[in-house]
């Protein structure tokens, strides 16, 4: 067998394996989405807001209540409901703070995921103080502002 033919064969095999992986990933993703849709349809009468797990002890603000939010009885809800409220009113211009248990704490945390990603993308050897700096960024404002939960 010639060297060029062996390389072509290896490329075809690699492309075939990549294609199979993509097909499997798309199939599994489709099954998960279908299962989620079935769950929402059967358990929550097709109301997708049930996935945010909104409890009746922290009902949504009036501006969000009109959306037909699915509410769980005798429940404080789950963090997802607060993130939904913040997503609808990220700059605290409306009334969404009425439905949030601790607005200052929840809004303060809105930038934690992007900051974690930015620190995580830099190799530790290039930015050894990145994690410490991020942690200090999160602690210092609490001490300076006197927000609830300050150490």
Image (tube, rainbow, N blue to C red):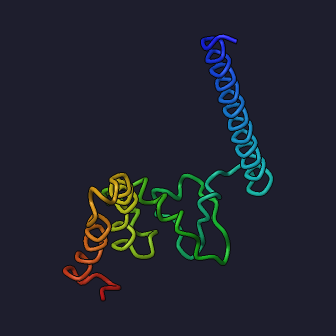
Give the number of callouts: 0
At a point 32% along the width and 67% down the height, the residue shown is 131
Seen in the picture, residue 103 relative to 45 is either above or below; the reply is below
Q: Is residue 25 left or right of residue 62?
A: right
At a point 36% along the width and 73% down the height, the residue shown is 105
- The residue at the far bottom in this view is 151
**Residue 73 sits in which quadrant?**
bottom right
Give the position of the N terminus as an image quadrant. Answer: top right
Give the position of the C terminus as an image quadrant. Answer: bottom left
Q: Is residue 45 left or right of residue 150?
A: right
> Horizontal and vertical percent for residue 122?
33, 53
> Horizontal and vertical percent for residue 65?
53, 59
- Nearer to me, 84 or 109: 109
**Residue 70 sits in which quadrant?**
bottom right
- The residue at the far left in this view is 144
At a point 69% along the width and 41% down the height, the residue shown is 29
> Horizontal and vertical percent for residue 119?
33, 58
At a point 65% along the width and 51% down the height, the residue shown is 48
Seen in the picture, residue 105 relative to 40 is either above or below; the reply is below
Seen in the picture, residue 34 relative to 63 is either above or below; the reply is above
**Residue 134 sits in which quadrant?**
bottom left
- Nearer to me, 56 or 23: 23
Q: Is residue 8 left or right of residue 144?
A: right
- Nearer to me, 150 or 60: 150
């Amino acid at each position: 067998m010639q060297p060029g033919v062996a390389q072509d064969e290896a490329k075809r095999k690699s492309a075939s394996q990549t294609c199979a992986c993509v097909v499997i990933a798309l199939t599994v993703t489709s099954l998960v989405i279908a299962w989620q849709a079935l769950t929402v349809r059967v358990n929550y009468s097709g109301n997708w807001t049930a996935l945010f797990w909104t409890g009746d002890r922290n009902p949504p603000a009036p501006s969000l209540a009109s959306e037909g939010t699915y509410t769980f009885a005798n429940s404080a809800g789950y963090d997802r409901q607060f993130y939904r409220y913040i997503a609808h009113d990220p700059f605290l211009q409306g009334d969404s703070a009425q439905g949030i248990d601790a607005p200052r704490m929840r809004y303060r945390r809105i930038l934690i995921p992007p900051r974690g990603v930015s620190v995580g993308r830099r190799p530790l050897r290039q930015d050894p103080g990145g994690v410490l700096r991020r942690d200090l960024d999160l602690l210092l404002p609490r001490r300076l502002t006197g927000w609830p939960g300050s150490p």
